[in-house]
Image (cartoon, rainbow, N blue to C red):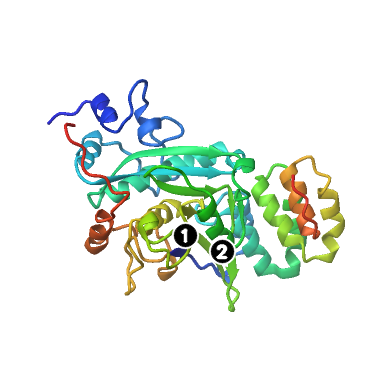
Amino acid sequence: MAASLRGVCAALGRTGSVSLCRDILGFSGSKIPAAPNNTRPVPVLNINKFVRLLRGKHFHVHLIFAGSELFTNNDMRRMDYEVFRLRDIYAAAGIGIGIITMERRTAANSAGHAVVRTRADVERTGHDITADGDFIPVVVPADMTPNLTAADGSIKPGLGKSPLKGPCSPRNEVDMNSVVVNFDGDPSSRTLAHEVGHFLGADHPTTPGTNLMAQNADFPGDSFFATTIIESDRNKMLAHPCVIRPGLAGI
Amino acid sequence: MANEMTFNPKDFSVEVLEEATRGRSHYIKPQLAVVLLKAKLGAGAESYLAACACDEGLDVRVRRVAIEELAPFSGAKELLKALTESGNPWVSEAASQALGGDISP
């Protein structure tokens, strides 16, 4: 069935004057972002694939920038690329992402969480900052450096944290409502996809691997392409009872 | 569930870390580079941290981490006091906190 973009937007609940790039795909610059360097894939928008994935189970994401006045234009261009990669990583597993929205909250409106310095701060941020609705809420603090120093002198920066299974979880781990992601340059898209994976119910693997749900610390080096979603994790994600949406009909 | 990486300061040269504090690394966030530099050089990092703390051309988030890392250096107290008077509230707040105060911008 051929889909019209207007029909797809309407099926997603977006009518009137809608920018596909800004209002659906979540690019703050209202255009397809450029690759950050020549070792990274150049974004290519495949509308047919996007629509096809929306006919199946999919989810929406709401990004909240805490301390928005501290983000630079360059940060936002980079974030657009991370958003593109997030969509691409899930698309490779046949999981669609419908709408990605971006909300900017000034430091004054971020409940003191624009600056995050400790692991406890990360959890409080994920508890205090969230959004209504059934989008997956993802908080990106402007200044997040929750570093631990190990006994051997190495530094372990926290990249992100998420409540396992999100709002549907019996709160047996941490009382977080939202995913929290350290906007950390190049690894951010993997961290974003990894933490969203936790929210959707996928755990860390019990054996070392290089798939999406493995921890970065398990494979030193470039983690950028370690983004495969294995079948068992995919099944867990698609079975999530409250943020996974049924396929859109009539598009 | 959390995700983390491990960076050993020994794996990076001072030059690489200094470049990273300027945002010229794809892999090391500038704020992390400041922390790694301090871990690598210890007291020898004080002058570079002070330069970062005062550099108005640097991202204010990097300046804040440099200010925080200067807190243990007794020789940096005068500089931190001066930075509490900064016109940039993010800088003055970080300097106040580094001196043990808790003054919000």
Q: Point out the image quarter for the N terminus of chain A.
A: top left
Circle nearer the N terminus (1, 2): 2
Residue positioned 60% across, 74% down in the render = A153
Q: Which residue is drawn at 22% across and 36% down?
A: A51
Q: In this view, does A95 lie to the left or right of A38?
A: left
Name the residue that disc number 2 marks: A119
Tag shown at residue B37: none
Where does the image place residue A171, in percent across and percent down from the top left?
42, 64
Give the labeled residue for mark 1.
A161
Q: What element carries label 2?
A: helix
**Residue B20 occupies which quadrant of the picture?**
bottom right
Instruction: Point out the image quarter for the C terminus of chain A.
Output: top left
For the point 31% across and 38% down, the residue is A44
| Residue reaching furthest to the bottom | A151
Question: Is residue B2 or residue B24 the one in the foreground?
Answer: B2
Q: Which amino acid does label 1 sit on?
A: Lys
Q: Do the residues labelled 1 and 2 touch (CB within 8 Å)?
A: yes
Q: Is A57 on the left-hand or right-hand side of A176?
A: left
Quarter occupied by residue B42: bottom right
Label 2 marks a residue whose chain is: A
Residue most extreme to the top: A16
- Residue B76, relative to residue B61: is it above or below? below
Task: Please provide percent x and percent y for residue A50.
Answer: 25, 38
Q: Image quadrant of residue A163?
A: bottom left
Query: Crowding at label 1, few (<14), some or many (≥20) Cα neighbours within 10 Å?
Result: many
Quick one: label 2, few (<14), some, or many (20+) residues within 10 Å? some
